[in-house]
Image: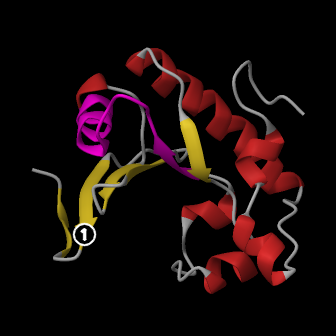
């Protein structure tokens, strides 16, 4: 089911971990509504970057989230976050572009210099972080 021109519900809910572990990763109505908003936000990011976005992970049921080591408060469980990669751009370039854009992001996190975590919220906090083997710190 298409949520937007470039993002589907299936793309934002697929989970290899859920399949491997036999866990249900079906979003409820509230989460599906958030996934619609997430897809709309990702369209804005795609337009900003001028390139397609590959979603590594978006929605995770609380059970899937726990199995992959996510925090219980993760916005992934609410359908408000996605971990993305953009071909031809480093995670640092993606992170910096989002920070500098003025887009209404809640969090943008360069994680392990491998992907970029982006999220939205009704009241965006504009938190920019780096998470890597050295720990968590503000994006500088």
In the drawing, does residue 25 fall left or right of residue 56?
right
Q: How many marks?
A: 1
Give the quadrant of residue 37: top right
Image height of 125 relative to 66, above or below? above
Residue 99 or residue 111, whichever sits in front: 111
Tell me which residue sits at (30%, 24%) in the image. Answer: 101
Dot 1 alpha-carbon crowd within 10 angstroms: few under 14, some 14 to 19, many 20 or more: few
Q: At numbered mark 1, what does the secondary structure look like: helix, strand or loop? A: strand
Image height of 48 relative to 108, above or below? above
Q: Is residue 41 magenta?
A: no
Residue 54 or residue 109, whichever sits in front: 54
Bounds of the magenta segment? 81-99
The furthest residue to the left: 140
Q: Is residue 87 magenta?
A: yes
In the drawing, does residue 41 fall left or right of residue 77?
left
In the drawing, does residue 57 fall left or right of residue 86?
right
Tell me which residue sits at (30%, 63%) in the image. Answer: 112
Residue labelled with disc 1: 132
């Amino acid at each position: 089911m298409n949520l937007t021109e470039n993002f589907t519900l299936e793309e934002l809910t697929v989970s290899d971990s859920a399949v491997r572990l036999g866990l249900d990763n079906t979003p409820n109505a509230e989460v599906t509504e958030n996934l619609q908003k997430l897809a709309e936000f990702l369209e804005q990011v795609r337009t900003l970057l001028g390139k397609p976005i590959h979603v590594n992970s978006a929605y995770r049921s609380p059970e899937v989230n726990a199995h992959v080591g996510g925090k219980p408060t993760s916005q992934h469980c609410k359908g408000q976050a996605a971990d993305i990669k953009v071909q031809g751009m480093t995670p640092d370039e993606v992170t910096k572009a989002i920070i500098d854009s003025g887009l209404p992001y809640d969090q943008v996190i360069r994680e392990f210099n491998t992907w970029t975590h982006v999220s939205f919220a009704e009241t965006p906090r504009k938190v920019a972080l780096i998470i890597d083997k050295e720990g968590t710190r503000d994006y500088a």
